[in-house]
Image (cartoon, helix red, strand yellow):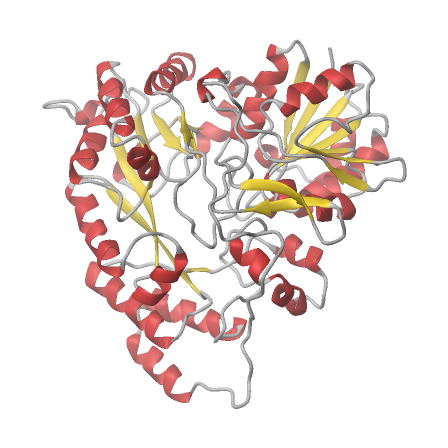
Amino acid sequence: MAKILFVNPVVREEDVPRHIPYGIALLAAIAMNNGHLVQIYDANAWRKGFGVLPDVYLADDWDVIAIGGLTTTYSFIKEACRIAKEVAPDAFLVAGGGFLTSMPQDIMEWIPQIDLGIVGEAFVTWPEVLEKVDNKDTDFSATLGVICRDGDGKPILNNTRPIIRDLDTLPAPAWDLFPLEEVYFKNSASLFSEDAYRIKRRIDINASYGCSLICRYCWHLGTTGDMLIEKDSNGNNDVVFTYGRNIRYHSPDYIIDMVKELKKNFNIDFVNFLDENLMTMDASSKRTWLKEICEKWIAAGLQPSSRRPGGKAAAPGEEPGVYWSGTSHASLHRPEILKLMYEAGCTHLVYGLESFDPGILKNLGKGTTAQKNIDSVGECMRSGIMPIPNIIIGFPEEDFQSVRNTINALIKLGIHARPHFATAYPGSEWYYTYKESIKEQYDGDLERYVADLGDATKITAVISHNFTGLELLGLQEIVAQRNLRVLDQAEKYWGRPGATNVAAPQESFNFRRKKIDGPIDGSK
């Protein structure tokens, strides 16, 4: 029986804490089901700074301190790991999640305090690691899906851990270990729709893993059949990401049972699906999965009051059903499923429209067109669901005409949007393609770039071939204002005689533009 402390790092300091870390909640439940003792310090929820971490680390004789998150949490994780080894040197420090999986060799070099890293999906690896720690066995040389250290501290990346086939074997996340009443429920409401603004008790769930699309900006986490581990030119194992995909989703019954339990135990009134894209799951299931979820949602009495025949919205705090939201795709949704989703309680869907330029969309890997992007907005609104568009500028091929095409579409659709910047996150195809250009923009210091990454609302490394960071900042404001006059004026006077491309693409060992499925376990 091991004593385990999970640390959830701070993310998006500019916003209030909104999302319970689903991965940590799942791994905590798995650990407890295996007889271990678990505590969580949710630094993102409490926002108390680094000064409290020594007290947290000294609160018990922890056998394991576990920390992980997305790359955007890197700076917090690095300092939290330093303090952990300084204050509690005997605790075994384990790291995992997207920040490590996308670049395990680099992370183990940059954060020497990490004893072991879990690479890719952790559902099977994590309990194996805990069993070995419990048995005082620190030899992980034969453990799949980890990066450990040899006697000299050199990182050794082991072979790939196959991902599990049946997601329904996973336990319910350990929601009760997080400050729901004190923090998360207080930050439930959002401005995405009228119903979403009225809610009081929201929880996120993850119903599926994977996506059939190959968007160049999307980072890979080794959880969707997209990751291999192969030897590089120096003979060392490293991660290789591909277009491989293993699409997996919980059964509708599993999802409905989970939501019913959340309603019973916490009286939630809203669920946000964290899934990469609900519509790719719908397509992968041959249009049965979402339909069955909606039908069973209604049959289980989870249909919100306002969506029931002749119904009207219940007073805040008295909602007998559960509203919900998720993600969609302009080419994969269908009017009939949108209508059923609305009836079941869907309030809004986030659409990654990104651009309305035909050339950019063709090269982006999203499987959509400018016209389908335009049509999708009205089609979604006609169903009663609010479409929430995401717009990006600064693509590698971005030019004045592509920006103009996007502005014209925004005007036509009546959309106001402040675009994000195209950002090469570790794990994405763009990151490996533009890695050398990124390093050049950060004076060769790749770690400084990783530490600088946020939610793509600020300029980090530019991957546009035509525009500098300064120019992209101006274009962002022009798009936000939908100001074609200023755009025309900027193009008229734009030009850098003799200038070379701002960013230059290169081939990379770590990304292979082929559909090669990573391993999945052999169970049916």
Q: Position of residue 379 (x, y in %)?
A: 17, 46
Which quadrant does the N terminus fall into?
A: top right
199 in relation to 172, above or below: below
Q: Is residue 494 above or below residue 199?
A: below
For this view, does 255 lie left or right of residue 51? left
Q: Residue at position x 20%, y 40% from top? A: 334
Q: Position of residue 9 (x, y in %)?
A: 63, 37
Locate residue 24: give its quadrant: top right
Relative horizontal placement of residue 489, taking residue 441 as reference (left or right): left
Residue in front for this viewpoint, 342 or 504? 504
Q: Residue 330 at what x, y percent from top left? A: 27, 49
Does the rendering let one see residue 357? no
Q: Nearer the viewer, residue 169 or 23?
A: 169
In depth, the one of 33 and 77 nearer the eye is 33
- Percent position (x, y) of residue 427? 57, 48
Farthest residue to the right: give it: 152
Determine which quarter of the picture holds residue 442.
bottom right
Residue 60: in sight, yes or no?
yes
Which sits in the foreground, 224 or 3? 224
Question: For residue 342, what is the image quadrant?
Answer: top left
